[in-house]
Image (cartoon, rainbow, N blue to C red):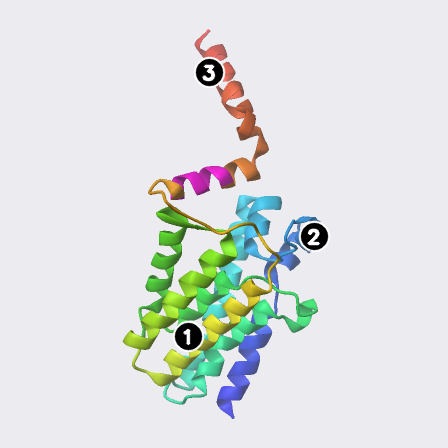
Amino acid sequence: MKYFVWTLLGYLCGSLMFSSLVSKYLCNIDIGTISDDKNPGAGNVFKYVGTGWGILCLVLDIGKGFLPVWMAARMAGVESILFALVIAAPVAGHAFPVFHKWKGGKAIAVTFGVLLGISSYSDAVWLLACLLILFTGILVVRPHHVRVILSFLLFAVWCGFHIRIPSILYGCYLVTLFVIVKHLLAPNQGKWEVRFYPAGLLRSIKEHCVSTYPDLRHGKWRGEHDKREKERSE
């Protein structure tokens, strides 16, 4: 019974769409309306609201995955196979939230929160981070949903060989399932593309900065900076 209680609490925590709530009620911006992909996630808060608010929402999304899993692991234990449901619950809540008409985010940040919650029993969080960095910055896979699906499939394979606790193993499988289903339901984002590009991570950061701060695209910021420096020297 205790595992079902923690599962319910984890799902309800995951269903709290902090990115949508923070941007709407604190910044008066509805990212679910103005964004191209209608995704109520931290990525769109970075893009449409600002870096500071984006960091806050990212931390909250990670926290809502971490806290219920970490608490359940210590108060109920990880031995029961039912703990797998506790692991998957925050991810399911974020992807398909009951408080947001079942239209949630992509569940990447909350997945890292969940994996941090079980990091005492597994190094899975670091493996997933390395895979996403690899396919984002070195062997660049596009579009985004293909990159995520590939990363999570390899993550699941790694878990099968390295995680010995059944509840954690099956929990990681469930997390993978929810994330992949969520990304399969995403709109088509263009043709598939794979490039070996070691500088891709820097390029991705630059592209994000340009999309977030359009003035950088035309060199406006640089021009104004040079002008101020010239005035100081005179």
Front tag of 1 and 2: 1
Disc number for residue 148: none
Front tag of 1 and 3: 1
- Residue numbers of the magenta segment: 201-207
Residue 33 or 121: which is nearer the viewer? Answer: 33
Specify which label sits upstream in the sequence, 2 or 3: 2
> Can residue 103 be spotted in the picture?
yes
Instruction: Give the alpha-carbon distance from disc 2 to disc 3, as whole Å.
Output: 38 Å
> Can residue 116 be spotted in the picture?
no
Residue 99 lies, in percent from the top left, at: 68, 70
Q: Residue at x 39, y 42 (%)?
A: 200
Give the residue type at disc 3: Glu
Q: Height in image: 185 above or below 200?
A: below
Q: Secondary structure at mark 2?
A: loop
Q: Decide: marks 1, 3 in contact (CB < 8 A)?
A: no
Front tag of 2 and 3: 2
As for residue 205 lying within the magenta part, the answer is: yes
130 left or right, relative to 88: left
Disc number for residue 229: 3
Disc number for residue 172: 1
The crowding category of the residue bearing disc 2, from other C-alpha atoms within 10 Å (few below 14, some 14 to 19, many at least 20), is many
Provide the residue designation for mark 2. 30
